[in-house]
Image (cartoon, rainbow, N blue to C red):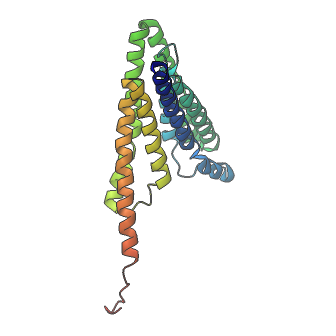
Amino acid sequence: MVSSGISLYGVGTYAAGIAGNLFAFVLFVSPIPTFKRIVKNKSIEQFSGLPYVCSLLNCLICMWYGLPCVSYGVILVATVNSIGAAFQLVYVTLFIIYADTTRRLKMSGLLIAVFCVFSLIIYVSLELFDHQARQTFVGYLSVASLVSMFASPLFIINSVIQTRSVEFMPFYLSLTTFLMSVSFFAYGMLLHDFFIYIPNGIGTVLGVIQLLLYAYYSREAREESRLPLLRSDGCL
């Protein structure tokens, strides 16, 4: 009975981590249509590369946290973020290639800064801390990075409330973000890892808010579309 319980616990933990990896992969590939357009037009147009630079730094920090030299038993955090870092690096590289000279220099500087910051984090965590303190140090950095990433939809939520429109909040993107957060929240809870379940718990709450707003305002839009149109003279 004990061994089967432990086995079930292990399977559940692994399943939650794998699910988080799969949903995160969907998020990583979601900008591909944007970059297909950039490559086709050979121009970044009005797109901003800053979100991809920030995502790259976030993935690198979380990948470092998931490696055995920092944390034990959370390798699925390292795998998903190593894949994410590779995608973000490709996106940033394409952005640099097709940007004008001014923005190319700016993005190149930001990319160099990301790797300098990440290198500094590695050096400090390895040289100044033992294993337990290293996990705490990198863990808090990963929490700060993830919370800032999950907080970015607050601007979209504010826009949805002000415009009463879900035009700029794609449903499937919101749903996937919510499912990824739930999966890693469960993964962190099962592993009793504060640095995983706290930020993903926040992400789960924000995901629920986005889905509720989507349901409310999309229903409101459907109801308005069913209302009879009035002619300018006030007649139907």
Q: Residue furthest right?
A: 40
Residue 154 at x, y percent in the picture: 35, 46
Residue 22 at x, y percent in the picture: 56, 38
Above or below residue 165? Residue 123 is above
Q: Nearer the viewer, residue 204 or 42?
A: 204
Q: Residue furthest front?
A: 1
Residue 28 at x, y percent in the picture: 56, 40
Residue located at (38% from left, 51% from top): 210
Residue 203 at x, y percent in the picture: 38, 39
Q: Nearer the viewer, residue 12 or 196?
A: 12
Residue 194, quarter of picture: top left
From the image, which quarter does the C terminus lie in? bottom left
Is residue 53 something that shows in the picture? no
Is residue 10 something that shows in the picture? yes
Direction from residue 6 to residue 79 in the image, left or right? right
Number of disc labels: 0
Residue located at (36% from left, 44% from top): 206
Q: Nearer the viewer, residue 17 or 71?
A: 17
Residue 226, quarter of picture: bottom left
